[in-house]
Amino acid sequence: MNSHRQVIDFQPCNLCGSGSARYVYPNLGLLKCDGCGLVRADNIPDSQEMGQLYSESYFRSADSGAVGYDDYIADREKISRTFHRRLKEIEGWTHRKGRLLDIGCATGFSLEVARELGWRAQGVEISEFACDFARKNLGVDVFCGLLANADMEPASFDVVTMWDYIEHCPDPAEEFKKAHSLLRPGGLLALTTPNIASVPARVWRSSWMGIKQGEHLYYFTPGTLKRLLAKSRFETVRLEHVGKYIDVDFFIKRAGLYSSTVERVAGWLTRSLGLGDRVVYINPFDIMLVYGIRMEQVE
């Protein structure tokens, strides 16, 4: 199949409204808008399908390279270290601690860290399994369901976070507009999402680890993300690549998706040196961290 085959997409582009797109990776069902270049899946699931996807098996996946996580709960310490690092950076921008909302908070580790740092934190999460874990084990405040259905006071939060969330959403523009309405004037939106224009994405193309068929619905570049934020009345004030804390064995396992030789050699070396379970901060330069400041009301 021609990878640049023209198609007519009857669902308007989430960014520019164009109805015309073409396949960039037909085997993965990814379309690129002819109007603005935004990349998205050709099959956007409904809320019921999304609820089924984010079950317990998503957080304990037999094939996390394709969907979900090996064991999200077992990785709690590493995940929490990543959130701690990101929240301390946010504090460097806000210079104060107030009310924080984490949208897509999963099992609530981010809320636990925020609470320990002195924030008044709440979360929103679609997964019933994750919500149940967060409430019972961490005692954090989580609304279980879609952000659109969360009954929260407008302009009541100082910070809204979306960690590895917006790429999963059927309608990113609406998510940003809702976040805008929940932030006080001048409030901060902080998010991370894969960068499909990054060097790893361009080199590995359809094999890039940022592509997860059926899970990631939108793929942003710095340009398309900033445009969508501006459309929702956010001023982008920071955009850079960030990493996360992982153990060496996990890094080698993921590298094996690109090269089995690298996985064998590196795996042997780390086992010989006893370094497999060492936790390190890895930045692959394909995950964007973006800060947006809430501007005037969305029309």
Image (cartoon, grey):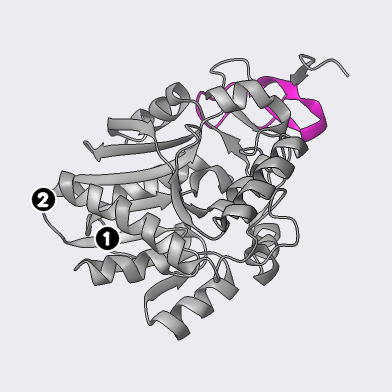
Give above or below for 262 relative to 19. Answer: below
Determine if residue 19 is in view: no
Residue lying farthest to the front in this orientation:
272
Query: Residue 279 location, x and y as percent?
Result: 46, 56
Residue 2 relative to residue 275: left or right: right
Give whichever of discs 1 and 2 has the lower sequence position: 2
- Residue highlighted by disc 1: 100
Residue sitting at 65 percent across and 40 percent down? 255
In the picture, the disc for residue 150 is none
Q: Please report the bounds of the magenta region as a residue range.
A: 9-32
Residue sitting at 61 percent across and 38 percent down? 210
Q: Nearer the viewer, residue 203 or 49?
A: 203
Q: Amino acid at mark 2?
A: His
Residue sitting at 32 percent across and 67 percent down? 113
Residue lying farthest to the bottom in this orientation:
136
Pointer 1 local density, CA inside 10 Å: few below 14, some 14–19, many at least 20: many
Determine if residue 135 is in view: yes
- Residue highlighted by disc 2: 95
Residue 221 relative to residue 297: left or right: right
| Of labels 1 and 2, the one closer to you | 2
